[in-house]
Structures are given as structure tokens and as C-alpha cells.
């Protein structure tokens, strides 16, 4: 199994530009999560999907952030316009059947720097 | 609001020594407790998913115990090795299997050779 695949791995962009992060979950998984890692807040959940439907987006920082999951094998996290405080590592993760008894599998992260 | 707390925040241990750290979580509406190991510049990797009070799980030199009644879990590392240096995260799903999972801030473990 290829695991959770994220792209790009690294991105440096200028303030005000649009950033799109992409994720391919593990085949067969029905839950997809977007996390952000920062020094101040650790690993925080931004949004999660179940069967391609957004379930909880209360962690999305503000309207500049949006996420979509058009099908079971692809999701995007978009930041428009980007700001320097958005600089962080963004992780996508997936699991099957919910998180109670099931492991979450993380991608390798997208390292975003907004200058 | 769910609070998942880990202590200590960081730990420096001599190679060969054993160590342990704690994860505290709300004891009501328990579903599961996850432990992850997170090496710098890599992604978190699952160690254990624990669901039953009194559960004890083991993976090589690493083991974990769970007390759901009092709301804590311990992670133990026996005979620490340099490759054990990482941040250890615990995570707690909220109130249903379809809920958000809250991560603690982690215990950063450094092993001195």
C-alpha cells in the first residue's frame, strides 16, 4: 500500500498568493483528516470528511481556508489569500471506520512557508 | 471542550535507562486512546490504540497501560535507545467514533548516548 500521499512536500509562496495542498488517502479509507502543526498549538485538526462529506470544519482558522473532497481518493486544502502566519506543516491523514478503535495513517506532510 | 494533557513536556534520558510518561484525558464518554510516535521531519506513526480499561499493550521495548476510570494512560520505554528519540503523542476521540480526535501536545523524548 502506498500510504497517504501529499503534495507538494514543500512550498514557499508570497503573501497574498493562493496555496493548494493535495492529498490522496489510503484506498478504502472512508475518513480523511486535515491537520496543521504549529509550534504554538501542536497538532490541531482543521477539518475531517466521512465518505467525502465534510463532518466538522470547526478547526478551520478562517474563511481564507477551504477544503474539498470531490471523490474518495482526492482532497484539497486551499488557502486564499495566504498570510505569513499560515506557515506550518499541514498533514493529511486517513482511516477506516472512524477513530475509536482504528489507527490514523498520516501523510508525510506539506511544509508551507509564506513570506 | 476536551482536554488531553501530556506530561512531562520534554524528557532527557540516558541510553539504557527506562522511562515513562503520562497522558490524561476526560474519563467520561471514553471510546479509545491512541499513542503515536513522531520523529522530527517525519509523519506521526501509530503505536497503540487502546479501548478497554486495564488494557496493556506492548510493542518491543515500548508498552502502554490504560485506566479509563481515572482518565490516564502511561507509556513505558524499557532500556531506551537513541532511536527512541521522538515526540510521543496521545490522542483522544471525543464522543463517538465519528468525532474529531484531539491530540495532546506531546512528550519530547531525547536519549543521551
Image (cartoon, grey):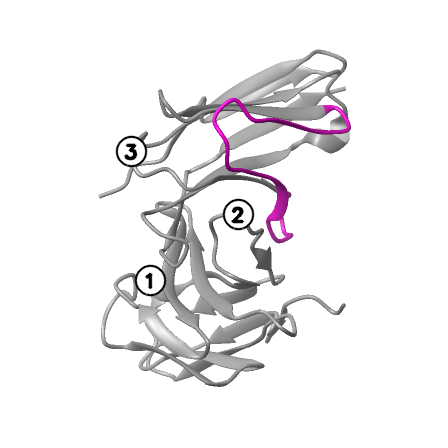
Q: Is residue B92 above or below residue A19?
A: above
Residue B65 visible, this angle: yes
Is A89 magenta? The answer is: no
Q: Which residue is mark 3?
A: B28
Q: Which residue is mark 2?
A: A101
Residue A15 vs B72, above or below: the answer is below
Q: Residue at x 44, y 79 (%)?
A: A52
Q: Are marks 2 and 1 in contact (CB under 8 Å)?
A: no
Return the residue nearer the eye: A109 or B45.
B45
Magenta stretch: give its range: B38-61
x then y, percent, for residue B35: 55, 38
Which corner quadrant of the image does residue B88 belong to?
Answer: top right
Q: Is residue A61 left or right of residue B22?
A: left
Q: CA distance from mark 1 to mark 3?
A: 35 Å
Q: Quadrant of the N terminus of chain A?
A: bottom right
Share a chain, discs 1 and 3? Answer: no
Using the numbered discs, state the Cα–Cα distance from disc 2 to disc 1 in whole angstroms.
34 Å
Does residue A115 appear in the picture of this structure? no
Q: Classify mark 2: helix, strand or loop.
A: loop
The residue closer to the viewer here, B83 or A105, is: A105
Q: Chain of mark 2?
A: A
Callout 1: residue from which chain?
Answer: A
Report x, y in % for residue A83: 32, 71
* Residue drawn 46% across the image and 76% down it: A51
Determine the residue positioned at 56% across, 26% down.
Answer: B55
Name the residue that disc number 1 marks: A85
* Residue A44: % across, % down: 38, 53
The one nearer the camera, B42 or B69, is B69
Amino acid at each position: 500500500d502506498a500510504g497517504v500521499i501529499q503534495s507538494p512536500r514543500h512550498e514557499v509562496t508570497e503573501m497574498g498568493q493562493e496555496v493548494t495542498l493535495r492529498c490522496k488517502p489510503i484506498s478504502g479509507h472512508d475518513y480523511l483528516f486535515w491537520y496543521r502543526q504549529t509550534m504554538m498549538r501542536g497538532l490541531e485538526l482543521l477539518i475531517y470528511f466521512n465518505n467525502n462529506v465534510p463532518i466538522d470544519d470547526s478547526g478551520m482558522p478562517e474563511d481564507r481556508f477551504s477544503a474539498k473532497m470531490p471523490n474518495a481518493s482526492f482532497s484539497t486544502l486551499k488557502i486564499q489569500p495566504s498570510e505569513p502566519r499560515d506557515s506550518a506543516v499541514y498533514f493529511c491523514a486517513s482511516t477506516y471506520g472512524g477513530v475509536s478503535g482504528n489507527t490514523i495513517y498520516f501523510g508525510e506532510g506539506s511544509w508551507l512557508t509564506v513570506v | 471542550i476536551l482536554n488531553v494533557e501530556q506530561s512531562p513536556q520534554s524528557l532527557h534520558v540516558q541510553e539504557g535507562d527506562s522511562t515513562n510518561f503520562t497522558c490524561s484525558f476526560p474519563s467520561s464518554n471514553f471510546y479509545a486512546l491512541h499513542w503515536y510516535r513522531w520523529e522530527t521531519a517525519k509523519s506521526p506513526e501509530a503505536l497503540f490504540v487502546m479501548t478497554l480499561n486495564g488494557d496493556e499493550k506492548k510493542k518491543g521495548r515500548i508498552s502502554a497501560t490504560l485506566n479509563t476510570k481515572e482518565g490516564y494512560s502511561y507509556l513505558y520505554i524499557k532500556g531506551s535507545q537513541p532511536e527512541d528519540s521522538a515526540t510521543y503523542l496521545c490522542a483522544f476521540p471525543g464522543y463517538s467514533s465519528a468525532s474529531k480526535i484531539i491530540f495532546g501536545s506531546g512528550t519530547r523524548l531525547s536519549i543521551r548516548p
